[in-house]
Image (spheres, rainbow, N blue to C red):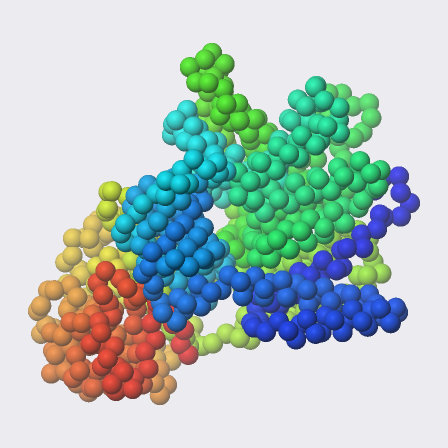
Amino acid sequence: MQTGYRHPLPSPFLLPVVAWCLGITLARHFVFGLLWPFYLALSLLISLALFLPKQRIWFILIAFVLLGTIRYEYQEMRHGVLKEILINRHRIVQELEFEVYSQVSDEYQNYEVRTQRLAGQPLKERILLYSTNALNPGSHYRAVVELRPIIQDKILDTGRTNYAAKAYIRQSLQELSSHRNTPKLARVRSNLLKNLERKLGDSSSLAKTLLFSDSSGKKPWVERLNPAGLTHLVAVSGLHVGFIYLILMVVLNLFLPRRWSEICFLFLITIFAALNHWHPPISRAILMIALFLIANWMSRPVSPAQVISLSLFIITLVQPEQLFSIGLQLSYTAVMVIFYVLPLFPSFSAKESQSWLEKIAGRALDYLILSFLVSLAILPFTLHYFGRGTLNGVIANLLGIPVISVMVPLSFLILFVPSGTILFDALLSSYNWLYSFFAQWADFCARLPLDIHANLPPAWIWALIILIATSFLILRKRFKLLKRLAIPAAVLVLLLLLQPFMSRSDFRIIVFDTGVADCIYLQMGDKKLMIDTGPAYLNYGRARKRETQDNWMQRKGLSWLGRNRIRELDYLFLSHLDSDHAGGVESLVMALKIKNIVISRFVKEHPLWQKWEETQLFGNARLTIVPDTMSILLPQARIKILHPDCDYNNRDENNSSLVLRIDHKQKSYLFAADIEAEAEEYLLQNHPSELKSDYLKVPHHGSPGSSTEAFILQVDPREVWISSSRFNHYNFPGERVLNLFDRYGIPVKMTADGSIHHP
């Protein structure tokens, strides 16, 4: 873009936009509440900028920081009403009018909806709605719903929810007829998706994902393409906009002058963006193309930095939270590599007097360089968000991008060409062949050895970003700037690398939020332990069955373990084999090395355990079958297994589950699994002196049949932990249990409010 200019084109908006983004980031991490001090400070800065020209740039930059903070705070205040109500009340059951925006997942039958009225009062929010009835995107409904807050777990969740709440339809679902014939993009989108599904059948998932960012179709492809480094090809992005731009401009230029062709393109691509819910990478690409085109119409050259900063400002002005979207971050990173890093490398396809074979080889080499640079630049982001990064895409993109560049227009043609025609049959055959080839190519590339599983601490991610940025400065030959930054950057990188070790605690307990289920992680010095593995999930569709592949450990637990560099466990205690405690065993054992597994004699006789032994699931793990009360001595703690002892013969799974007492320094912890009143009474009679503990993991998720008064008084805890969600169909924790803790002034922590971290 800068060819022919002696000096780089100016980008005066770059630093103000950086300051604006800094203000949004500060507002996200610090709750300010009041806006009037910011307005007052902003007025003062504007006045100072008018009268002090030498310092004007600094006043302007600080003003943009304040503007970014104000914009984000205003959004939070405007959309925080429902969240505030739910934080205080935890649940609301009211009549709700809403419009269905899109289906998020067919498997879990949930929808993104926009609220219209709650209990007759206007309310504009975006929520996640679960419905056993099929809903039509673009239609308006009225129903009595139960609204609950979406809890962001500070320990487990790395992202941020886009929804103000989640809702469940309870009764009186009714489609509002007055809105049935209202033309809506959501309804158009839904009809187009159904048309693709009807024409392509089981292979429609890829076309639906490529054209409309369909969530239900994208999920299986994302999981399949992650190790191959091809996930970006099924996320509608600037790459797809580029494909569409080239195709439309070739077609439109046959009938219209170039400028009119460009105007028509902008109109059509805007509709495409709306059908894709204004996905941030698409918005970025459209804005950048529009800015370049407008500058060209006005014969005003514009720098890439100016276009990048202006497009980012517009997107975050409309939706400030998009700044923290992984899609937007990856999109802008890739664009900056293309504009600023790629030109530093020689082009192998730009040489004169090349044969066609040399040109093809040269373009392939250019392609490899670009793919490598982009993959390297986005590596810190993928390591942070997903706990993995891959350079397999360097090879995979060689064929992946050309195939997808053909499948995008092919999918459009299939969408609009009538089925049953000769043309449609030819298009369908081509699509199915490319679909099969792409899947096989992705599977082949996934087996390449460049898939990196390295869940790094956030501090190490920042160190990696600084090192990559330093390499960028070296490539740009910015040696003067590099000399100034070298020492501060080296010190900062060193501190970031040391930070995880400086803040490392030799003792911690985490009771994870797994719903009405148990998974507890303990670290004692260099020893890592886990009690139970969380639940297996049930399908939300008609066929409700236990799915060992779909469990909490697979979805969330392994990601947390990876981010914390936990690759092996010294001890895994399985209290019993109910699916809410042992649902993640298979996923955990296949992902981590387990040195010791401790179970009761009742678990040893369980059919599920025998099945696992037949398949040699546990490999070389040392198995300890608890014969009686016993102790395990660790360098910093003692673990005593109190229950079941050799005289206890009740085979009820809950009452025969393992009960552990852990003593560390001067504190004691009692983990009571799922025992109920019968086992509590047995412990009171046989091991009363061992029950006294400072902290108690409440038996059976606070079941009304457990936590008897005599048992709680004997334990006499200073704090109790309940592993349960609120308003579950078991009605755990029981009201009697909560009242008991309240009566004796015992503080209660629930995983319903997020995972419990101690100390």
Looking at the image, residue 437 lies above or below residue 345: above
Quadrant for the N terminus, please: top right
Residue 747 screen position, x and y as percent? 33, 82
- Quarter of the image where one finds residue 581: bottom left
Looking at the image, residue 340 lies above or below residue 119: above
Question: Residue at 60% of width from left, 42% of height from top?
Answer: 282
Quadrant for the C terminus, please: bottom left
Residue 698 screen position, x and y as percent? 26, 74
Q: Is residue 578 left or right of residue 88?
A: left
In the image, farthest residue toward the right: 6
Q: Is residue 585 in view? A: no
Question: Residue at 20% of width from left, 70% of height from top?
Answer: 703
Q: Is residue 164 left or right of residue 658?
A: right
Looking at the image, residue 85 lies above or below residue 95: below
Residue in the foreground of this view, choosing between 403 and 754:
754
Residue 342 screen position, x and y as percent? 73, 43
Residue 86 screen position, x and y as percent? 39, 66
- Quarter of the image where one finds residue 238: top right
Question: Residue at 24% of width from left, 42% of height from top?
Answer: 543
Residue in the foreground of this view, choosing between 679 and 251:
251
Q: Is residue 337 left or right of residue 177?
A: right
